[in-house]
Amino acid sequence: MKSWPQLPEDGRTADVYRVLSVMSQQPVNRQYLLARCRLAPSQLDKLLTKLVADGALEVIDPARFAGREPSVA
């Protein structure tokens, strides 16, 4: 997460804050959040879409790292 988002009144729930807290501490994927948080898949998708649209969430596509050799220092 790049910044803490402004949430609408109906989005200020313990479950949403729990997801935001987890995302503010470490990089996570959708599957991780679904397994550990109490939001329904559709609720989580709606939240993630809003966060991306608001610029509060950085999305990292691991596919862009496929095939790269680790750098040797």
Image (cartoon, rainbow, N blue to C red):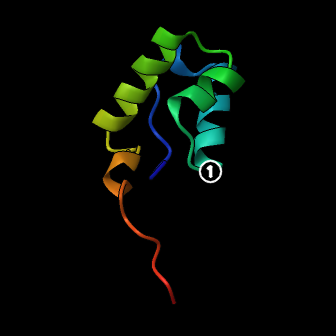
- Tell me residue 29's x, y (percent): 53, 36
Query: Nearest the camera: 61 or 21?
Result: 61
The answer to whether residue 61 shows anywhere in this view is no
> Residue at the location (62% across, 31% down)?
32
Question: Relative to 42, does residue 66 appear above or below in the rendering?
Answer: below
Answer with left or right where residue 67 lies relative to residue 8: left
Few, some or many residues within 10 Å of mark 1 (<14, 14–19, 20+): few
- Tell me residue 69's x, y (percent): 41, 69
Query: Nearest the camera: 2 or 11?
Result: 2
Disc 1 secondary structure class: loop
> Residue at the location (41% across, 44% down)?
57
Residue marked by disc 1:
26
> Residue at the location (51% across, 90% down)?
73
Question: Relative to 45, does residue 72 appear above or below in the rendering?
Answer: below
> Residue at the location (44% across, 35% down)?
6
Question: Relative to 68, does residue 56 appear above or below in the rendering?
Answer: above
- Tell me residue 16's x, y (percent): 60, 24
Query: Across the whole image, how many numbered discs are drawn on residues?
Result: 1
* Amino acid tagged 1: Gln
